[in-house]
Amino acid sequence: MPLVPSGTTRRPGTPPEQGAGPLLRAWREQRRVSQLELALRAGSSARHISFVETGRSRPSEELLLRLAEHLDVPVRDRNALLLAAGYAPRYPQTPLDDPSMAALREGVERLIQGYEPYPALVLDATYHVVAANRGIAMLLDGVPESLLVPPPNAMRLVLHPEGLAPRIRNLRAWRGHLLEQMERQIALRRSEPLRALYEEVAAYPLPPGAADEEPGQELGVSLALPMRIEHAGRVLSFISSISTFNTPMDVTVAELAIETFLPADPATVKYLQSLMM
């Protein structure tokens, strides 16, 4: 599956006329950082931070970016802070199909293809699949076309009762892991589209048989929670790993994640390697 744009995720923010203060205060409170602690980290003063948050002082562009860095504000929301303070956005948002992204697209595609026969895919900020290798295609065999309409969503593919959910042997544990992962991302990004997706997939009914799983079944691998999934009459076991780009300077790149699936047992390794013969 080639690397393709999945649309722009937008969420409402504070109107620019309200200034950057309310946005900055919201991020500081969400990160549970005091004005004094933030001031010490950013080389400012608690008094100045207070003035900025209440609108009594307009922060410089450099200070605003420094505060955002120490609060781990996502790149997209740093642009919102700058706009609210009256500055131009610092970080572009370049579509994946833009010619300037050709090297990135080719590099990512080579990376996930080189991971074959093990599954690997590329996700955006709301878990839309923008690229996937043949290992993923193998796992999706039999999934209805309605769930594969571009761009497919990874959470829907896994948790929908017509998707992979009926084939996942430890669905309760894996579902809990995915929902907790989404909750952490919502806390980090404060994304309304991500929250809407969470509410949708959390409401999916469990397929018949999911309640019959044996407790502790997923503990067979001590390294990490595996996903145990039926495929072609056998049960494959995978441990997932997610990678992101270091110090991205573009909103699109900042929100990409590469998820890879390592075989969690010798039988899975043997089967996947046999596919290459």
Image (cartoon, grey):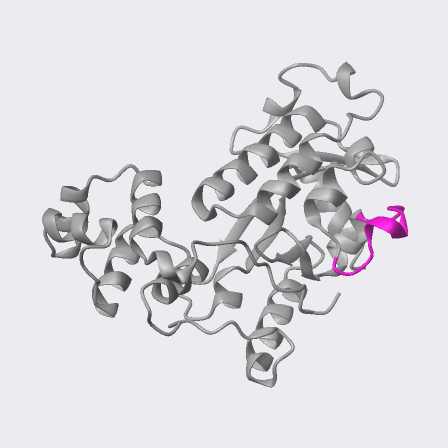
Q: Quadrant of residue 206?
A: top right
Q: Nearer the viewer, residue 140 or 262?
A: 140
Quadrant in which the N terminus appears: bottom right
Q: Is residue 206 left or right of residue 66?
A: right
Q: x%, y% of residue 82?
A: 35, 65
Residue placed most toward the observer, 271 or 180 = 180
Q: Position of residue 140 (x, y in %)?
A: 81, 49
Q: Write the residue at 60% across / 48% down.
A: 193
Relative to 217, say whether 59 is above or below: below
Q: Is residue 69 above or below residue 241?
A: below
The segment highlighted magenta reads 140-151
Question: Residue 120 lies in what quarter of the image?
Answer: bottom right
Looking at the figure, which quarter contains the C terminus?
bottom right
Magenta span includes 80: no
Percent across and percent down for residue 4 are 69, 69
Number of residue marks: 0
* Residue drawn at the location 70% of the way across and 36% of the way down: 201
Q: Residue at x 64, y 65 (%)?
A: 114
Tell which of 72 and 225 is nearer to you.
Answer: 72
One can see residue 19 in this view = yes
Tell me, yes or no, if residue 264 can be seen here.
no
Residue 198 in the image, given as x and y percentages of width and height: 63, 38
Determine the residue positioned at 60% across, 36% down.
Answer: 178
Residues 79 and 187: in front is 79
